[in-house]
Image (spheres, helix red, strand yellow):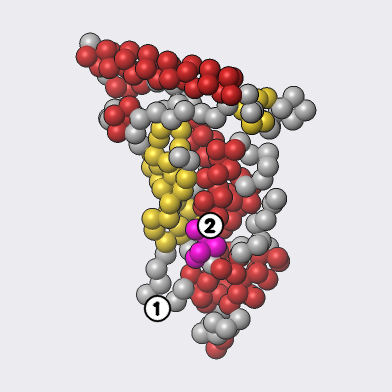
């Protein structure tokens, strides 16, 4: 369920790919060589290796993120991006987006930034049952509150953030996306958030094949 979908990217007036456009901008001081696209992949990798980030700021990318509200809060911490999120003040998230059961993972006491998937079926089943009960009760109380005339902005306080689905648009420069994917595909990122970053990275590599392999963290 946790995923990222590419919905918009900078489109140059000239017939240039994203890679070609980045290199075109990078060669602003060498206009005679700006149309040299043959070396674009090599130059892209060189720019990253040397930390020359400004050409990557010439490309803007917007992705749609679908996740739970607690993971969305982690994503919003990346302040170089602009966000537009589904508003629970104006719409009913239980009808528009619904809920999502979370995986049963155990606390890793050796590393508090890690959790461990359990193969205990009984524990997993009980965890699903607990979440289902929470969803059912929360939705019933939420709709009861609305029926009483309670405003959505107040009634939403009943909804569990970790189980309630959200949708948001996340827009930033390619430089910001490179940093985000580098940070959030690492093992110390929560699994659900890491999955989103991995989807985002797949889209970026599709746009810029020269970047493939640069973000391998496994």
Please name whichever residue, 98 or 46, is drawn nearer the observer in this view of the structure. Answer: 98
In the displayed structure, does residue 6 sit left or right of residue 55?
left
Rendered-image quadrant of the N terminus: top left
Closer to the eye: label 1 or 2: 2
Label 2 crowd (10 A; few <14 / some 14-19 / many >=20):
some
| Picture coordinates of residue 74, whole percent (x, y) | 54, 35
Q: In this rendering, is residue 62 above or below 58?
A: above
| Picture coordinates of residue 210, whole percent (x, y) | 60, 69
SS class of the residue under badge 2? helix
| Picture coordinates of residue 214, whole percent (x, y) | 66, 61
SS class of the residue under badge 1? loop
Look at the numbered discs 1 and 2 and tell me whether their residues touch, using CB distance below 8 Å.
no
Q: In this rendering, is residue 153 above or below 20?
A: above
Tally of numbered tags = 2
Q: Residue at x 61, y 36 (%)?
A: 190
Dominant secondary structure of the magenta stretch?
helix
Q: Which residue is mark 2?
A: 202
Q: In this rendering, is residue 168 above or below 137?
A: below
Q: Residue at x 41, y 32 (%)?
A: 165
Whether residue 31 is visible: no
Q: Is residue 54 magenta?
A: no
Label 1 crowd (10 A; few <14 / some 14-19 / many >=20):
few
Q: Residue at x 45, y 57 (%)?
A: 61
| Picture coordinates of residue 108, whole percent (x, y) | 71, 27
Whether residue 26 is visible: yes
Q: Which residue is mark 1?
A: 14
Which residues are the magenta region? 202-207
Q: Is residue 203 magenta?
A: yes
């Amino acid at each position: 369920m946790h995923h990222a979908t590419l919905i918009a990217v900078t489109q140059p007036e000239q017939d240039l790919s994203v890679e070609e456009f980045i290199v075109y901008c990078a060669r602003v001081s060498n206009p005679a060589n700006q149309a040299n696209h043959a070396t674009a992949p090599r130059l892209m990798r060189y720019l990253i290796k040397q930390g020359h980030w400004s050409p990557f700021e010439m490309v803007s990318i917007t992705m749609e993120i679908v996740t739970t509200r607690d993971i969305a809060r982690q994503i919003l911490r990346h302040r170089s991006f602009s966000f537009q999120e589904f508003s629970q003040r104006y719409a009913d998230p239980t009808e528009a987006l619904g809920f999502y059961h979370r995986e049963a993972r155990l606390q890793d006491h050796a590393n508090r930034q890690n959790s461990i998937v359990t193969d205990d079926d009984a524990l997993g089943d009980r965890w699903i049952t607990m979440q289902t009960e929470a969803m059912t009760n929360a939705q019933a109380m939420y709709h009861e509150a609305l029926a009483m005339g309670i405003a959505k902005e107040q009634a939403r306080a009943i909804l569990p953030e970790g189980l309630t689905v959200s949708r948001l648009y996340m827009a930033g420069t390619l430089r910001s996306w490179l940093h985000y994917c580098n940070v959030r595909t690492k093992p110390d990122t929560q699994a659900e958030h890491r999955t989103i970053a991995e989807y985002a990275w797949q889209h970026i590599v599709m746009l810029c094949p020269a970047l493939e392999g640069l973000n391998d963290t496994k």
